[in-house]
Each structure stands twice: as structure tokens, then as C-alpha cells.
Amino acid sequence: MNLISTTASPPVLVIALFLLAGCSSIGRTVDPAKYESMSCTELNSALGDIARDISQTAITRGKVANTSVPRWLLGGSRVKTAVADRETARIGRLKQQEEAIAAARGHKCSTSSN
């Protein structure tokens, strides 16, 4: 008799993965001073990276929100809501970073070719 199952249901694995991955993003703040020392090319690249991260996080949040949690999984819907809320908060932090990068790029990089 095998007491430990080697296969878990996909929603449980997805939720567990997002709980573990989300803990790494707790406590980060935006530091606009670090963007002032970057070149225009670096700022553009950073802006693209942030936009990609926002898109990936939004996709993840959508997948979590659309995950069907079995009724027998006690607290599963609360975990699903908590993970979706955390992803929403991460999107908010990423948007703050995006705004800081865009402001630094606006001050530093001109669109004219003087």
C-alpha cells in the first residue's frame, strides 16, 4: 500500500507553485535613483523587461483565477483568491517600476536627434 501519492491533481500543484514563487517577490520597493544612472538603451531594455513581467503576471493571475478548485479541497478557494490577490499586488509594484523607468527615460533621453 502506497500512502504517498506521486500524482497530485493539477490545480493543487499550480496553487502550490504560485505560493512558492510569490514569496520571492515580497518586500521589494522601487528605487528611482538606480534608473538615473542607466543609459537610454538600458532604460529601454528595462522597460521592455517590466512590460513582459506585467504580461506574464497577468497571464498567471488569469490562470489562477480560472482554476477549478475541487470542493473536497478545504480552503482551496481561499488559497486561489490569495494567490490572485498577490499577483494583482505584484502587477501594481511592476507598474510603479514601469512609471519610474519611464520618468527617468523622459528626463534623460530625448526623442529628437540633436
Image (cartoon, rainbow, N blue to C red):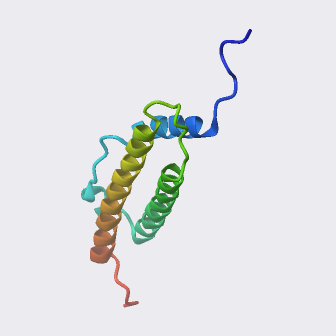
Q: Quadrant of residue 37?
A: bottom left
Residue occupying the far front of the picture: 71
Q: In the image, is residue 94 above or below residue 76?
A: below
Residue 62 visible at all: yes
Q: How many marks?
A: 0
Quadrant for the C terminus in the image: bottom left
Q: Is residue 47 above or below residue 1?
A: below
Residue 87 at what x, y percent from top left? 41, 50
Please give left or right for residue 48 compared with residue 106 in the image. Answer: right
The N terminus - image quarter: top right
Residue 96's x, y, as percent? 30, 61
Decide if residue 37 is in sight here. no
The residue nearer to you, when weighing 23 against 112, is 23
Where, by quadrant of the figure, is residue 104 drawn?
Answer: bottom left
Q: Going 39% across and 67% down the picture, which residue do you hit?
A: 39
Nearest the viewer among 69 and 82 is: 69
Q: What residue lies at 46% left-to-right and 65% top-to-bottom?
A: 51
Q: Position of residue 80 (x, y in %)?
A: 45, 43
Measured as percent of width and height from the top left, residue 12 is found at 56, 35
Farthest residue in the right direction?
A: 1
In this view, which residue lies farthest toward the top? 1
Residue for point 68% across, 20% down? 5
